[in-house]
Image (cartoon, rainbow, N blue to C red):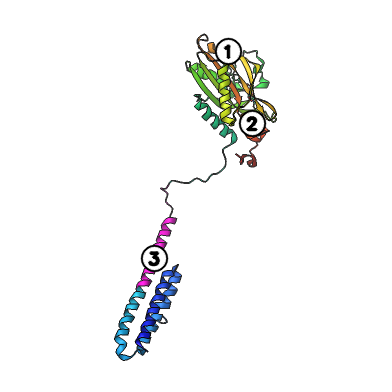
Amino acid sequence: MALSDFLAQLEQLAVEAQAAFDSAADSDALEAARIDFVGAKQGRLKAAQKGMGQVDGPDKPAAGKKFNEVKQAVEAAFEAAKQRLSDGAATQASAQRFDPTLPGHLPRVGHTHPITQTIADMKEIMGRLGFAAVEGPEIEDEWHNFEALNIPLVHPARDPLDNFYLAAAQAGGNDTLLLRSQTSTVQIRVMEQTPPPVRIISLGRVYRPDTADDTHYPMFHQIEGLLVAPGVTMADLKSVLRMFCQSYFGEQDVHIRFRPSFFPFTEPSVEVDMSWQAGWMEMGGAGMVDPNVLRAVGYDADEVTGFAFGLGVERICMRRHGITDIRNLYTNDVRFLEQF
Ligand code: FA5
């Protein structure tokens, strides 16, 4: 065989071996290429080595030299490919390794209940208007639920049929206790402990033995608002309610209607209605804090005046989301809850 032919075969082998090792995507492909090119029995290098015997005698040293160069290049290409695959496997393994020190990712499970969302939104909006959120107990005594609110013993609002009284033994004392029927109890608790000015809201559950229908439920939530300071008027009350509504409903002009009403602890008193579909929905009660209430908590009724309001949280939530039956909020049907 002519030397030039032999050298050309070696060049070709080197190029093909390099390409095969470079393109091996995994260890199986690399092993197949290794057997093909450097395999001890059938490998193409081995075959080339045998072919050297056919080269003319004087050309043999040159053929041997070239063979050794190509052999080294092919083996180096194999080693490089082996290293590349093992580096890749190490990187992949470290990417998959569980590192307990990394911050976790909680997938979203479930939804915030629309009432919880409404309460959070209300706190946020009223907070921007300067009202601090305070808590009060759900089990109340008669003083905070009635007397301090100017609701005397004989008042029909205290009827056992309209309240959830707790048996004295169950309540653990002699005082008559009940599940609070309104969040106005918190007004008293705050004013008893805080000198004016006062600017608070309180949000929480209240209980009444009402029959459930599309706008009533025996357990529901109220937001109570109270602002007491020198010179507070009904105009402030309406402004605060309008600003709240504009923020919460995202509407430029939510129609709010005040209807004359009566609450023993406010004078004058109003029912607060808001436009709802083609008509009106009663959202709550409000008024100017009765001077008797201010005096009952030790305030000087000649120095300060105040407004108070108590709105139904469910009804406000219903208006915003177009919910037409309050019972949807409490049946825990996930098809309903998933929408929030
Ligand atoms: C009161 O509870 C007064 N404490 C409100 C108040 C506060 C007046 C401060 C003056 C000053 P009323 O009983 O009307 O008022 O209830 C207020 C709102 O609670 C109602 O307008 C309604 O939106 C909601 N509400 C009343 N009963 C239910 C019920 N069973 N289910 C759902 N929401 C109700």
Along the line of sight, the residue nearer the viewer: 192 or 335: 335
- Tell me which corner region of the image, top left, top right, bottom left or bottom right, holds residue 275: top right
Q: Which residue is mark 3?
A: 84
Image coords of residue 85 (percent x, y) = 41, 65
Image coords of residue 9 (percent x, y) = 39, 82
Task: Say which label, 1 or 3, has the lower sequence index.
Answer: 3
Indicate if the residue with disc 3 has its beta carbon within 8 Å of ligand 1. Answer: no
Task: Say which label, 3 or 2, has the lower sequence index.
Answer: 3
The amino acid marked with disc number 1 is: Asp
Answer whether residue 32 is visible to the viewer in this image. Answer: yes
Q: Is residue 188 above or below residue 113?
A: above
Q: Which mark is residue 290?
A: 1
Q: Which residue is mark 2?
A: 319
Report, in whole angstroms, how far the alpha carbon at label 1 lies from the one at label 3. 85 Å
Query: Quick one: SS at disc 3?
Result: helix
Range of magenta residues: 76-102
The amino acid marked with disc number 3 is: Arg
Q: Is residue 99 above or below residue 329?
A: below
Q: Is residue 170 left or right of residue 93?
A: right
Report, in whole angstroms, how far the alpha carbon at label 2 lies from the one at label 1. 30 Å
Along the line of sight, the residue nearer the viewer: 5 or 192: 5
Within 10 angstroms of label 2, few (less than 14), some, or many (20 or more) residues? Answer: some
- Tell me which corner region of the image, top left, top right, bottom left or bottom right, holds residue 205: top right
